[in-house]
Image: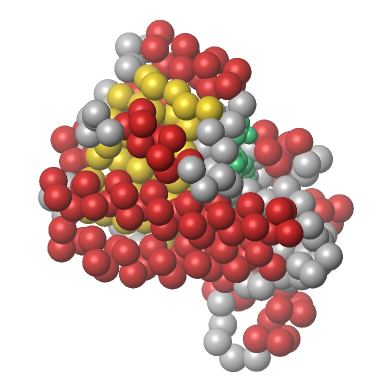
Amino acid sequence: MADLQKYGPWALVIGGSEGVGAAFARLLAADGFKLVLVARKPEPLETLAAELRELGAEVRVLSADLSQPAVLSQVRAVTDDIEVGLLVYNAGANNTRGLFVELPEEVTQSVIAINVLGQANFARHYGALMAARGRGGIILGGSLSSYLGSPTLAAYTGSKAFSRIFSESLWAEMAPLGVDVLHLNIGFTATPAMARLGMPVELAEPPETVAREGLENIANGPVWIVSTPGNIERARLISTVDNRAQTVRTHAIAPRDKTAEAARAQQKLAGESSK
Ligand SMILES: NC(=O)c1ccc[n+]([C@@H]2O[C@H](COP(=O)([O-])OP(=O)(O)OC[C@H]3O[C@@H](n4cnc5c(N)ncnc54)[C@H](OP(=O)(O)O)[C@@H]3O)[C@@H](O)[C@H]2O)c1
C-alpha cells in the first residue's frame, strides 16, 4: 500500500505506540518498512516493537516527551544514522478542557508545543533531508476541529488550524522537491486516549481505517478528510467564511458528556446529504 521505494526504508512514527500511530506502524511493517516508534510510556512501545519484530520488521523505539524542547535532539540521536523517508507525526490529542485563561499554563503550552512547534520542527528537520534526496512523505496529524474554534478547546483547535494551513503551504513547497505532504484530517476515532477519557468509542472510527486512508492518500494532499460518515459534511458546514459568530455558537465541539449525541447527529447529517 505504501510505496517503499518512495517513502522508505525507515518510517518515523511520532506517537507510535497505540491507536492510530500503532495502526500506521502495523501497516508499514507489513509493507516492508523499518520503523522508529516514539511515545512516552516504554511498555506499550516495547510490546508493539516485539509484535512487529515477530513479523520480521526492524524496529527502534524511543521513550520521549514531545512537549519538552529537547525532544527533536533525542529523536535525532536514534535516527541520524538511518534514512527516514516517511514521517508520521500522529500524537497531539487534547485531554484537558477548560477556559484558556483558567487552565494551567503548562497544559496549553504542552498542546501548542506538541501540535505547533513539534509538527513544524520535525517537518523541517526530516523534510530537509527528504528534499535533499528528492523523495519522501510527511503525514501530519490533523483534526476536523481545525475548521472551527470551540470554547474550552482554544489551544487545541488553534493548533490544529495551524497544522492544516502549515501542511497546505508545506505541500506546495515540497511537491516540486519530490516530497508528499498530507494533513490527515481525523474525526472521532476509537483510540485508547479517547477511551481513557470515557468517550463512547463504540460510535467512533477504528484507528486502522484512519491509518489506512492516510497511507492510501499520502500523495493526495494537502488535506485528506477521513471518510467517517458525516466528516466531510461537517467540515463543509463549519468552514464557511460568512457569519463566523453564528457558526461558532451553533457548531462548537460538544462537551464530553454530549459526545455520543454529537456523533449520532453527524451520522444523521451524512445520511441526509446522501439522499
Ligand atoms: N481520537 C480522536 O477522536 C481524534 C479526533 C480528531 C483528531 N485526532 C488526532 O489524532 C491523533 C491521535 O490521537 P489519539 O486519540 O490517538 O491520542 P494521542 O494522545 O494524540 O496519540 C496517542 C499516541 O501518542 C503518544 N503521545 C501522546 N502524548 C505524547 C507526548 N507528550 N509525547 C510523546 N508521545 C505522546 C501516545 O503514547 P504515550 O501516551 O505513551 O506518550 C500514543 O502513542 C492526534 O493528533 C489527535 O489530535 C484524534
- The one nearer the camera, 11 or 83, is 83
- The one nearer the camera, 175 or 202, is 175
Question: Is residue 209 visible in this depiction of the protein?
Answer: no
Displayed quadrant of residue 144: bottom right
Residue depicted at x 47% and y 27%: 62
Pick the quarter of the image with the C terminus.
bottom right
Displayed quadrant of residue 148: bottom right
Question: Is residue 14 visible in this depiction of the protein?
Answer: yes
Where is 253 relative to 209, above or below? below
Judge from the rendering whether residue 206 lies leftward or rightward of residue 166; answer left or right.
Answer: right
Residue depicted at x 71% and y 87%: 245
- The one nearer the camera, 150 or 37, is 37
Judge from the rendering whether residue 250 lies leftward or rightward of residue 90; answer left or right.
Answer: right
The x and y percentages for residue 28 are 35, 30
Residue depicted at x 73% and y 48%: 95
The x and y percentages for residue 8 are 23, 34
The x and y percentages for residue 100 are 76, 67
Colour basis: secondary structure
The x and y percentages for residue 217 are 34, 50
Where is 112 relative to 79, above or below? below
Pick the quarter of the image with the N terminus.
top left
Judge from the rendering whether residue 75 lies leftward or rightward of residue 198; answer left or right.
Answer: left
Where is 235 relative to 133, above or below? below
Residue depicted at x 73% and y 86%: 246
